[in-house]
Amino acid sequence: MRRRSAYFCHLLLIGILLSPGLNLRASAQPQSRPLQDQLAELCRKHDVPGMTAAVVNAEGLVQADCFGVRKRGTSDKIELTDRFPIGSNTKSMVATLAAVLVEGGRIDWNTTIGDVWPNASDDHLHPKLRAVTLDQLLSHQSGLAGNISDISNQEWASFFEERRTPVLERRHLLKLVLAKAPSQAQGTFVYSNLGYAIASAMMETRAGKSFESLMKAHVFSPLAMRSADFRTLAAAKQLQPPLLWGHQAETGEPADPRTAGVENPTVYAAAGTVHVSLEDYAKYAQWQLAGKPSPVLRTQDAFDHLHTPQCDYTSPGAKYGAGWIMMDTPLGPALNHTGSNTNAFALIWLFPESDLGVIVCTNSGQPQAFTACDEMVGFLMKKYAPASDSRSDANAITPERLVGRYQLTPSFVFDVRLQDGHLMVGITNQPTQEVFADSPTKWSYRGVDAQLEFHIRAQGSSYALTLHQNGAAQVAKRVRD
């Protein structure tokens, strides 16, 4: 049976973002009843068993509440401590672990599959996959099939038995997948859960520890996400009430969390089997919004890589990188993703420049459950988005913040300067040319079909730029002065 851990949707809430809202300050829980009222309205409107929602900023949790029941047809109420499956929203956490290992010298963003397993013959590692990099796997550019079921339904079904340890399950996956030629175009976005499974195997091979233990030690623990864990069938069978039940996408019937098939198997841990409480998930969102590497990372370069687009996404103007869909909005650059295991949904939107994050989860995989979550996200954005005149002038994106040197390759460096109010760009061994503003962050050449897109946080200088030319997008990172 095929799982939908790859399931995510692109939300169209930009009009809502233009509405005036509130300045965000960390506050205590008693003020959160309006959230529960809205959750209750949406649960009844869309026949959803339960929902939970949170608003976050760089200081912490702003508001959070929940409504509904853990299992349809019962009176067992959902609580904020319940651990929701977040599906493919796990992926940005996996990229965060990759950044930790890159800092530690265990692996690099450009490390290839062939680098990790250099002794693999062409019979075990197809030549067209040998040069696929970690970054390509984490941005769905590998050309791999989307899921195991695309290769073998029989093998996919067998993984739900979880007869081996997660590490050995991934080793078995490598044998099934890596010998086959890419089934999709390489170098462009084609969503692949297999890519993340292989990336996790690369990381645990280089680090000498299981992927799950690395995530707990280097991502969950530093952020005090004590409820976060990877679901396994063995652990699920030991669960005791009260239990949060999922509800099937097709029928809405309750799905017992202790049974096989209600969650993706352990081989897909990196593709999306994290379960976490809303309050602990908010800690992760807070760290992403704060824009600083500590306590998970040591360097700003590693953190910035997690917010740097790697390729065009399927929606016009949107990009993808490091487990995030990235797009420009009236609130500044946004990071978003949706996850589902077919029995639940989790949505997250982050706006670093506006210091606003929104998380919504439900214990139903039905289509109307996604609609309910989408509407809740819209409600929270409208209520909490800062008014346009409340955004500090100090945070305005000015050409001065774009000035700097950006390295595409060691022999290809952009030198961006401001001269008499004009933004001038020099390139190694090429003449300096003026670029012209299409928007505060996008500047185009005249006479050359090329555009520079600068990536910037709420404060400080741009940390990277993307050169868009001839249908390709190439990222150059700021060189520290």
Image (cartoon, rainbow, N blue to C red):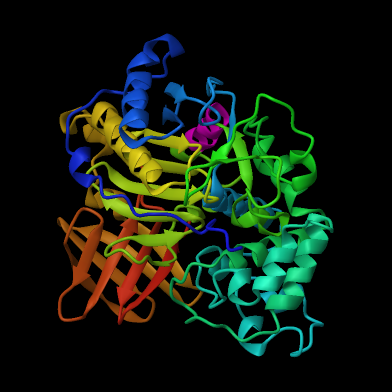
Residue 194 lies, in percent from the top left, at: 61, 67
- The region drawn magenta spans 278-287
User: In this rendering, does residue 202 appear at all?
Assistant: no
Q: Measuring 74% from the left and 28% from the top, which residue is drawn there?
A: 240
Whether residue 180 sits left or right of residue 341 in the image: it is right
Which residue sits at x=54%, y=34%? Answer: 281
Q: Residue at x 47, y 47 (%)?
A: 251
Q: Residue at x 78, y 62 (%)?
A: 169
388 shown above or below 106: above
User: Which quadrant of the structure image shows residue 475?
Assistant: bottom left
Name the image quarter holding the N terminus: bottom right
Does 237 sit left or right of 379 as displayed? right
Say above or below: 198 vs 303: below
Residue 40, percent from left and from top: 36, 24
Asked whether the viewer can see residue 454, the reply is: yes
Pick out the residue farthest to the top.
Answer: 30
